[in-house]
Image: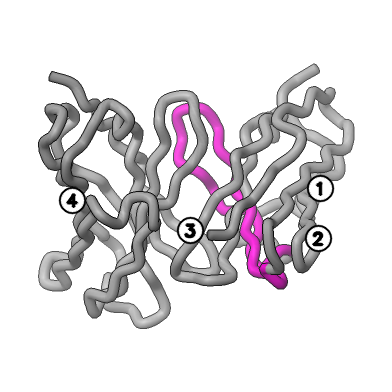
Amino acid sequence: EIVLTQSPPTLSLSPGERATLSCRASQNIRDYLAWYQQKPGQAPRLLMFDASNRATGIPARFSGSGSGTDFTLTISSLEPEDFAVYYCQQRSNWPRLTFGGGTKVEIK
Amino acid sequence: QLQLQESGPGLVKPSETLSLTCTVSGGSITSSDYYWGWIRQPPGKGLEWIGNIYYSGSTYYNPSLESRVTMTVDTSKNQFSLKLRSVTAADTAVYYCARDYRGGDYWGQGTLVTVSS
């Protein structure tokens, strides 16, 4: 089973700052990684697929990078609505999937 | 606009079977491009993938749950379903259904299932 480790667990930042979230896979998953955003009381929302492709309607301030075992989600300048929990999901042995443990981006 | 809606009991007794249905509207469950999945989230915790099903009935389950899970599809009703047997308090969670295509791009709102006597 592929294990995804997200870091840090919590990121405390101010609006306008840059956020850098990490996701590390226990084995090579090429670029088969997705990112999700989840706000309290809501279902997750797909942000990125195939590591670096923005999903429909996702603002350009969100970007993804990485391949193999190390991946990054970057939010270039945090907007108030970006404070949420972010999850990565590996898709290299799709349709079998796993999620990372999540990173909470909170207001400093 | 595609919509997914979970339905089923909100309370299940320990050792019994949890049964949920996801109804898909605004699109066909028989589209060849997509899998349909269940994901759960215990209160205050992260996401756990339960399994995916194709409209043909092919299923793929989380190994940690595989011995207790069955997913089925009813194409005539545009629905797919989840059964989780022998539940315990650890199965208390919000259960989501979702369409899977390069990622879960459409999700239901989620339904809280509590396991308690």
- Chain ID, mark 3: B
Reading the image, the residue beneath label 2 is A65
- In the displayed structure image, the side of residue B18 where residue B95 appears, left or right: right
- In the displayed structure image, the side of residue B83 where residue A10 appears, left or right: right
Reading the image, the residue beneath label 4 is B83
Alpha carbon distance from label 2 to label 1: 8 Å
Alpha carbon distance from label 1 to label 4: 38 Å
Q: Residues within 10 Å of mark 4 (few under 14, many from 20)?
A: some
* Quadrant of the drawing holding the C terminus of chain A: top right
Which label's residue is closer to the chain start, 4 or 3? 4
Q: Residue at x 67, y 30 (%)?
A: A104
Rendered location of residue A19, percent (x, y) = 83, 38
Question: Nearer the observer, disc 4 or disc 2?
Answer: 4
Quarter occupied by residue B102? bottom right
Alpha carbon distance from label 4 to label 2: 37 Å
Residue type at numbered disc 4: Lys
Instruction: Identify the element where label 2 is drawn.
Output: strand
Reading the image, the residue beneath label 1 is A74
Rendered location of residue B77, percent (x, y) = 12, 65
Question: Residue B78 or B8: which is nearer the viewer?
Answer: B8
Instruction: Identify the element where label 4 is drawn.
Output: strand
Residue type at numbered disc 3: Gly
Alpha carbon distance from label 4 to label 3: 21 Å
Q: Are marks 2 and 1 in contact (CB under 8 Å)?
A: yes
Q: Which stretch did the figure color magenta? A: A29-51
Q: Are marks 3 and 2 on the same chain?
A: no
Is A95 drawn above or below residue B14 in the view shown? Answer: below
Question: Residue A2 or A108: which is nearer the viewer?
Answer: A2
